[in-house]
Amino acid sequence: DLTEPKTPEGFDLILDAWLDAQAGRGTGFNGPAPLTWHDLEAMERKTGRNLRPFEARAVLSLDRAYLAAALARPGRAQR
């Protein structure tokens, strides 16, 4: 029996915003580029979201954690 782990209150909003912002993510020579404030502003304009400053910072922090994990995965060449 699999049960879904509990997430902190409000995390769904952060995760949804992060997933929406990924649609505009650029790439570089090393893979996906980090999301920027401009990416979040564009996502807000296109989706009608209005993130509060601490929510926007949380989205960017989530993105940095995602990129760190993605770049550290086994089999990926380290530079």
Image (cartoon, rainbow, N blue to C red):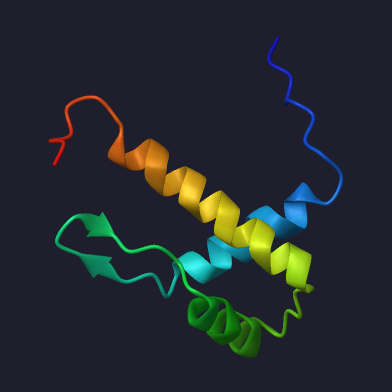
Q: Quadrant of residue 68?
A: top left
Q: Give the camera-side residue of 75 and 46.
A: 75
Q: Position of residue 39 (x, y in %)?
A: 49, 78
Q: Position of residue 37 (x, y in %)?
A: 54, 77
Q: Is residue 47 left or right of residue 3?
A: left
Q: Position of residue 59 (x, y in %)?
A: 62, 60
**Position above or below: 64 against 46:** above
Q: Quadrant location of the N terminus?
A: top right
Res. 43 in view: yes
Residue at 73% in and 79% down: 49
Residue at 50% in and 83% down: 38
**Position above or below: 76 against 21:** above
Q: Quadrant location of the C terminus?
A: top left
> Which residue extends farthest front?
79
Q: Position of residue 50 (x, y in %)?
A: 76, 80
Residue at 12% in and 35% down: 77
Residue at 59% in and 87% down: 46
Q: Quadrant of residue 73?
A: top left
Q: Is residue 44 left or right of residue 8?
A: left
